Image (cartoon, rainbow, N blue to C red):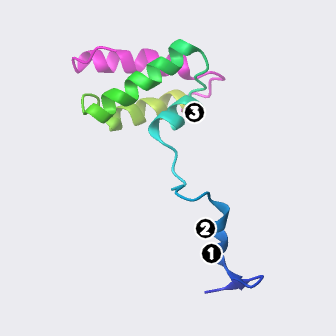
Amino acid sequence: MLLVGGQSQSSTAQAAEPAGATGVASLADRLAAGLRARLPHEKHFVTEVVALVHAGRLPQKLVDSTYLWAVQRRQAYPFPAFEHALRIQANQLGVAL
């Protein structure tokens, strides 16, 4: 263990995070921030998607891959592409969004 300023690096790293923080963003936070959801209906759509994932009706792998596709398109505002593509894919699975 390497000491830095009288503290080990591991305790320094832990002190930088608030108590109880895991350092991993929740699905809702990641979608809202990454897709730049800002309008009420966009935030509602993200909440609905997260609820369907948690209920097991919509595969998280599908949501993740659609999210990555929309973000990697290099559009300034990726939410519309994500919403459109996810609605199509969810419809094919028989899940209404």
Asked if residue 36 lies left or right of residue 20, the reply is right
- In this rendering, the answer to whether 58 lies above or below 21 is above
Residue 85 within the magenta-colored segment of the rendering: yes
**Mark 2 belongs to which amino acid?**
Gln
Q: Which mark is residue 11?
A: 1
**Mark 3 belongs to which amino acid?**
Gly
Q: Which residue is disc 2 drawn over?
A: 14
Give the residue at x 51% y 32%. 31
Q: Which mark is residue 34?
A: 3
- Towards the viewer: 5 or 82: 5
Q: Earlier in the sequence, mark 2 or mark 3?
A: 2
Which tag is nearer the camera, tag 2 or tag 3? Answer: 2
In 3D space, how far apart are the residues under numbered discs 2 and 3 (Cα atoms)?
26 Å
**Mark 1 belongs to which amino acid?**
Ser
* Residue 64 in picture, x, y percent from top left: 41, 36
**What SS does tag 1 mark?**
helix
The picture quadrant where one finds residue 11 is bottom right
In 3D space, how far apart are the residues under numbered discs 1 and 2 (Cα atoms)?
5 Å
**What SS does tag 2 mark?**
helix
Label 3: few (<14), some (14–19) or many (≥20) C-alpha neighbours in 10 Å: some
Q: Earlier in the sequence, mark 3 or mark 1?
A: 1
In 3D space, how far apart are the residues under numbered discs 3 and 1 (Cα atoms)?
30 Å
The span shown in magenta is 72-97
